Image (cartoon, coloured by chain):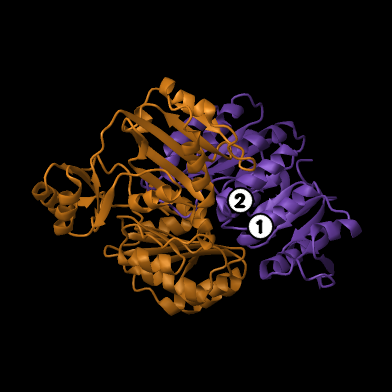
Chain colours: A purple, B orange
């Protein structure tokens, strides 16, 4: 098991907001064990049968939770994450977009000092197909299997997961690491877990322009035994242009070509299109024969 | 958001760090009068980009007449594509030492980093590593002792300058604060140039006026509507949801021989109104010939997107690919109106590139 499994008990912070409500329903439908929700001032309410508390402290007095997912608006997100850290919830999946980077640096440092995995911010979350979803991704594109996906992107991950699932390549775990410049858990933090994981036979790494997460991952991949296949978005992006993600500022990191080169030198097979990933994987690990309808 | 040099200097001066005596001017006549007051001056174009000196954005004058002439030159030119609307006219400094101090958010260590060099006044990338010192800080505990940095810089006893700069960096939610150079004039330390970038995500709790980087009408419209739009020089308009997906769509168009006209990211959960507005903006690109819309529905609903497309009714060949939430409904809405919907990204890109 990496990070989560079918027994992971989840707390939802920001459960009474529009997004919190909707995705609590979607996660419950997927089979995720949601034990409580938190929204200050909303104690006594319930969302889809999940009891709501005023604080993590209150919730933890009455319920037992392992992990947290955070939908709290950016202004208040740091306090919410700090509360979850205080109660050693792990992992803490931070869906919220637009958190000030100084706030993120603070809660990420606290979490790492305690050995807690923050996933995100600005992440679609994490899914162990057919077992547990702590996130906002559309469930139906994922299928249980033995390929792990680690990605800096949201919808592009759905695209690639759908393509893999349609080609009989199910997934052991998919982690959106988040699109912000500072994130809690990076490729290099996760790769060792998948190298050890018995359920994972191959790893797909989805990167994009900006920063040096892919370059740092390459250094670790050199020492890995399991095959890694990568795709990097932004090959056609002109230098110096900001393409949406705060993290994808090209002038502060390698361009797509130099990332591809670094990964290739580490022995990674780099796909030039999203659909090529499944072709490469089929040659390496074979399919599990079950295709997504 | 970048700050203008004069804004950065106001902050630095307000925290007790000296800056050169100078005035902000908007005409050559004003520049002349300032030079009458200050004597030898530096005239610095106020633009939101780095590398200004190399681009000819800083000129010197030894008389008021010359200051006027140099100001005329600067007002009539563009620096990195920016029109020059304001000049900072400053008294020329006596230089004994030039020092570099930069503080950044270092994404790979997830901490603020202070970078210093006793060889300031030049591109910091060109300074040999033995003249650079980098110190990472705890974002929770801050800077407790700067003595190792000041002694490296040969300015022991002046720790307060670095402490103040770190205070400004955190107080104003900066991603970058750079003093290059910090000049020693034989008497005191003076911040001769200040570059600062404030975190866009923190503008809600800061009091800055918004500085718009140089952008055209379409980019401005998109920004006002919260749509991420970057203009490129091709002819195939690209719209999608999610930065990674839009980039991957652009990349595939490019690999198949097409030329993307833009990057346009609707973000998450776009409704029909937002889709309509994005299409209208993209269609205004002067060389636009075709349009490709790629939607992966999660929190975004394909039926809403389809309705937005119909309302915008694009007047160029348009290829749609949609998948996910309410896909069937979206497809039905579009196909009833005679618009074909492709199943895969590959098919959609193939179809838009070949369409002529």
Q: Residue furthest top?
A: B130
Q: Position of residue A86 (x, y in %)?
A: 78, 48
Find the distance from the CA under tag 1 to the CA under tag 2: 8 Å
Q: Foreground: B76 or B172?
A: B172
Task: For residue A274, say whether it is visible.
Answer: no
Q: Position of residue B265 (x, y in %)?
A: 47, 60
Q: Position of residue B119 (x, y in %)?
A: 36, 27
Residue A238 appears left or right of B265: left
Determine which of the numbered discs, if any, sits on residue A55 in the image: none
Which quadrant would the N terminus of chain B be assigned to in this image?
bottom left
Q: Is residue A109 above or below residue A61?
A: above
- Circle 1: is it few (<14), some (14-19), or many (20+) Cα within 10 Å? many
Which residue is disc 1 drawn over? A77
Residue at (67% x, 61% y) in the render: A72
Q: Is residue B66 above or below residue B123?
A: below
Residue B130 appears left or right of A117: left
Task: For residue A244, say whether it is visible.
Answer: yes
Determine which of the numbered discs, if any, sits on residue A103 in the image: 2
Q: Position of residue A156 (x, y in %)?
A: 55, 52
- For marks 1 and 2, the one nearer the N-term is 1
Quadrant in the rendering for residue B122? top left
Pointer 2 chain = A
Pointer 1 chain = A
| Discs 1, 2 touching: Cβ within 8 Å | yes
């Amino acid at each position: 098991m990496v990070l989560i499994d079918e027994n992971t008990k989840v707390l939802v912070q920001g459960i009474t907001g529009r997004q919190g409500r909707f995705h609590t329903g979607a996660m419950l439908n997927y089979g995720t064990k949601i034990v409580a929700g938190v929204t200050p001032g909303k104690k006594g309410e319930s969302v889809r049968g999940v009891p709501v508390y005023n604080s993590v402290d209150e919730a933890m007095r009455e319920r037992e939770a392992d992990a947290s997912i955070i939908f709290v608006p950016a202004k208040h997100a740091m306090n919410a994450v700090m509360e979850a850290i205080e109660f050693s919830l792990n992992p803490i999946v931070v869906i919220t977009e637009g958190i000030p980077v100084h706030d993120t640096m603070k809660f990420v440092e606290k979490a790492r000092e305690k050995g807690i995995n923050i996933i995100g911010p600005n992440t679609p979350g994490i899914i162990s197909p057919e077992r547990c979803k702590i996130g906002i991704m559309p469930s139906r594109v994922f299928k249980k299997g033995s390929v792990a996906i680690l990605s800096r992107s949201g919808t592009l991950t759905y695209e690639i997961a759908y393509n893999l699932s349609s080609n009989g390549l199910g997934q052991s775990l998919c982690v959106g690491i988040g699109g912000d410049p500072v994130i809690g858990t990076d490729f290099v933090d996760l790769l060792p877990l998948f190298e050890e994981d018995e359920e994972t036979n191959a790893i797909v790494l989805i990167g994009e322009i900006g920063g040096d997460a892919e370059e740092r991952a390459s250094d670790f991949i050199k020492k890995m035994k399991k095959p890694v296949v990568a795709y990097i978005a932004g090959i056609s992006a002109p230098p110096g242009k900001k393409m949406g993600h705060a993290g994808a500022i090209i002038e502060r990191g390698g361009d797509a070509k130099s990332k591809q080169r670094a990964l290739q030198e580490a022995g990674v097979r780099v796909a030039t299109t999203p659909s090529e990933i499944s072709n490469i994987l089929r040659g390496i690990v074979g399919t599990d024969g079950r295709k997504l309808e | 958001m970048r700050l203008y040099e004069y804004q950065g200097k106001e902050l630095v001066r307000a925290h007790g760090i000296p800056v050169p005596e100078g005035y902000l001017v908007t005409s050559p006549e004003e520049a002349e009068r300032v030079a009458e007051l200050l004597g030898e001056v530096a005239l610095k174009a106020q633009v939101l980009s780095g590398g200004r000196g190399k681009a000819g954005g800083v000129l010197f004058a030894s008389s008021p007449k010359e200051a006027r002439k140099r100001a005329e030159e600067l007002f009539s030119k563009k620096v990195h594509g920016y029109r020059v609307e304001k000049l900072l006219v400053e008294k020329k400094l006596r230089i004994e030492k030039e020092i570099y101090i930069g503080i950044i958010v270092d994404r790979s260590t997830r901490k603020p980093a202070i970078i210093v060099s006793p060889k300031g006044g030049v591109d910091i990338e060109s300074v040999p590593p033995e003249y650079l010192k980098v110190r990472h800080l705890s974002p929770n505990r801050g800077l407790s002792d700067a003595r190792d940095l000041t002694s490296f810089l040969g300015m022991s006893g002046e720790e307060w300058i670095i402490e103040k700069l770190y205070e400004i960096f955190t107080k104003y939610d900066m991603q970058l604060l750079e003093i290059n150079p910090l000049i020693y004039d034989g008497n005191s330390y003076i911040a001769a140039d200040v570059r600062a970038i404030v975190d866009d995500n923190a503008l809600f709790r800061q009091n800055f006026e918004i500085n718009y980087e140089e952008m055209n009408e379409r980019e401005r419209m998109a920004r006002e509507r919260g749509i991420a739009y970057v203009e490129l020089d091709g002819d195939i308009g690209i719209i999608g949801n999610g930065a990674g997906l839009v980039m991957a769509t652009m990349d595939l168009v490019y690999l198949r021989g097409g030329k993307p006209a833009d990057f346009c990211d609707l973000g998450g959960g776009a409704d029909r109104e937002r889709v309509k507005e994005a299409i209208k903006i993209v269609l205004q690109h002067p060389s636009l010939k075709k349009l490709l819309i790629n939607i992966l529905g999660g929190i975004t609903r394909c039926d809403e997107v389809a309705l937005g497309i119909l309302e915008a009714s694009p007047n160029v060949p348009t290829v749609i690919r949609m998948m996910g939430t309410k896909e069937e409904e979206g497809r039905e809405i579009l196909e009833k109106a005679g618009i074909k919907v492709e199943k895969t990204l590959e098919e959609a890109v193939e179809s838009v590139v070949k369409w002529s």
